[in-house]
Every structure is written in C-alpha cells, then in structure tokens.
Amino acid sequence: MLQQKFTRRIGRIVLCAALGAAALSAVPAWAQFAKPENAVEYRQSALFLIGNHMGRIKAQLDQSKPALDQIKASAALIDVLKTVPFEAFTPGTADVGDSAAKPEIWKERDRFDKLAKEMQDKVGQLNAAAQSGDVAAIRTAFGETGKACKNCHEDYRRKK
C-alpha cells in the first residue's frame, strides 16, 4: 500500500516536471530576456567568446607546430556556443546600447537565419576537423568557417 502511494506520487511529480518543461520550452526565446539590453549583452558576450576562440585557433595555425590540444578545446567551445547568440536577436533590440546589429536582420530574417545556419554547419565541420588532429583539414575548415562568419558580418553588422 505504501509503495503504491509512493509510486503514484513519483508519477505525479514526473508528470508535473514534464508538463512544466514543455510549457517553458513553448515560451518564445525573446521572453527569457527581462530587458532588450539583456538580449544585446547576451548575444555580444557569446559572439565575443566565439571570436576570441577563433582568434586562438588562428594564432595556433600561424605556428609551425600548432598546439592541437588548444585548437581542439577552442573548436569544441565554439561548437557549443554556435547557436547561443542567435536566440538573442530578438525584436526591439536593433538600436539598443552599442549593438552593431543592423536593422536589416529583422527585415531579412529568413536570410539572416540561413546565414547563421551555414555558419553553424561550418563550425561543426571545424570542430570535427580539430578533433581529428589533421592540421590540413583544420586549416581548410577554419577558412570556411571564417568565410561563413564574414558573409553575415558584411550584410548584418555595423562597422564600429
């Protein structure tokens, strides 16, 4: 009897947790930022880290004997971060703070999202190449990733 009550109670807790998680995942991404400034800071922070670690990889690739452990670590981190900034390109954040985001992002959202996806795919390829340890493959994937970043920056990022 006691075990049945315990089992039912656990079942209700699991059901409530699942329903709560489903409800939270249905909330639009923009709702997670209390203020537009928070969204801008969030995406800038993620993009800063991505750029910083791309720079670290480049610095290693410029060496005659690149430190593969450093390249692997940076590529893995970029791969984790590759989608993070894009959830913070929310309506109402075009002219907030010192954002470099051009208003065209929101006017051409489908194209912006397509370029973001292309960059994310290239980052995945860079990480795979880095984890393989093949320096030639890393160089190629790094160049392709850089081009994908540049494609978006040319049309959607203000020069500072």
Image (cartoon, grey):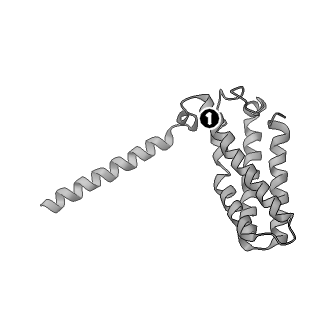
Q: Please provide percent x and percent y for residue 105.
A: 75, 34
Report whether residue 128 is seen.
Answer: no
Number of disc labels: 1
Left or right: 50 as drawn, with respect to 63: left
Left or right: 82 as drawn, with respect to 122: left
**Residue carrying label 1:** 39
Q: Secondary structure at mark 1?
A: helix
Which residue appears at 69% of the width and 27% of the height?
97
Instruction: Name the residue furthest left.
Output: 1
Q: Quadrant of residue 95?
A: top right
Q: Is residue 34 above or below residue 115?
A: above
Q: Please provide percent x and percent y for residue 106.
A: 72, 31
Left or right: 116 as drawn, with respect to 154: left
Q: Is residue 150 above or below residue 64?
A: above
Q: Quadrant of residue 63?
A: bottom right
Q: Please provide percent x and percent y for residue 104.
A: 78, 31
